[in-house]
Amino acid sequence: MSVAEMATHGTDERGFRSGVPNKVLHVDDVHKSFAGLHALSDVDLDVRQGETHAIIGPNGAGKSTLLNVCVGRIKPDRGAVIFDGNTLTGKAPHEINQLGVARVFQTPEVFLDLSVLQNVMVPALSKRDGYFNLNPFTAFAGETAIRDEAEEVIANVGLKYHIHSPASSLSRGDKRRLELAMCLIQHPKLLLLDEPTAGMARHDTNATIDLLKEIKENGMTKIIIEHDMHVVFSLADRITVLAGGRIIAQGSPEEIKNNPKVKEAYLGEEQV
């Protein structure tokens, strides 16, 4: 079983899509401030079933804050997030995860003292049982089916030869691949990736692009935050651009490349 086996509308004057079909995620008028600083203002976003939707913008644009609102780590001051017919706003992160949302964090969050294999088995057990109480002496005993699937996912993300190594021994790039494997084994309906190729050499980045393209073939919906425009334009079906906590543009990769507001927002940083 491969990783893939796991996993005519007008626009307004800003390039926003109307009548979005088959939307799986709807962010409705989300606002969030920190000590008077507006991190997010008037954010409305629709993500379609099966698409790869990239969110880009300068540093401090509010990209990670938006993801944190979506997964329940941050409660918005106003607005709501609706996923697959369920209102996520007000739910705890583990409740949102059980509904089918998984996230790869900007800084890899793995169990450093566990092996690569055990790290991947942990979320699979949690997803199955709805909870996970880690007992290193008994937690993984007798879990043959989950172990077999974990080994396959690990091989597919390129960590086959590190399967029994402690996570603490991995490079930053390999930790990111490990965290991706920990998400994929949960068979999420929506996968959120915050800088998935950060810290990777170009050949590792290209391998990750190929892996995410393979996942796309199975119809898994993905939201990607990424500064590397090579990654964005290789993967994204649509792109949303944030600047100063507000959406300034949405559209296809070609539309975003040619949008003067986007070029202005990236002046001095990424040149789109």
Image: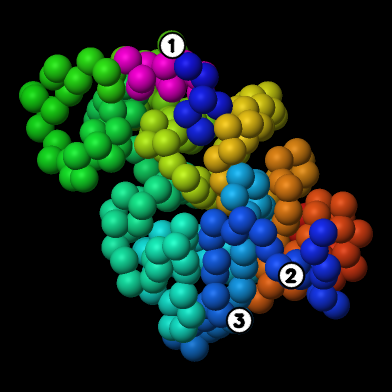
Residue 81, compared with residue 269, is above or below; it is below
Distance of mark 3 from mark 1, alpha carbons?
47 Å
- Which mark identifies residue 42? 3
Q: Is residue 165 visible?
A: no
Instruction: Give the CA distance from mark 1 to mark 2.
Output: 47 Å
Asked if marks 1 and 2 touch (Cβ < 8 Å), the reply is no
User: Which residue has dot 2 on it?
Assistant: 18
135 left or right, relative to 213: left
In percent of width and height, residue 48 lies at 63, 54
Foreground: 118 or 188? Answer: 188
Q: Given the image, on which type of amino acid does mark 1 rest?
A: Tyr
Q: Residue at x 10, y 32 (%)?
A: 135
Crowding around mark 3 (Cα neighbors within 10 Å: few <14, some 14 to 19, many 20+) is some
- Tell me which amino acid carries mark 3: Asp
| Side of 157 relative to 17 (left or right) | left
Report the residue marked by disc 1: 161
Q: Residue at x 44, y 62 (%)?
A: 85
Of the numbered discs 3 and 2, the one sitting upstream in the chain is 2
Q: Is residue 238 magenta?
A: no
Q: Position of residue 3 (x, y in %)?
A: 51, 25
Residue type, numbered disc 2 = Ser
- Tell me which numbered mark, 1 or 2, is placed earlier along the sequence: 2
SS for callout 1: helix
Q: Which residues are magenta?
A: 148-159
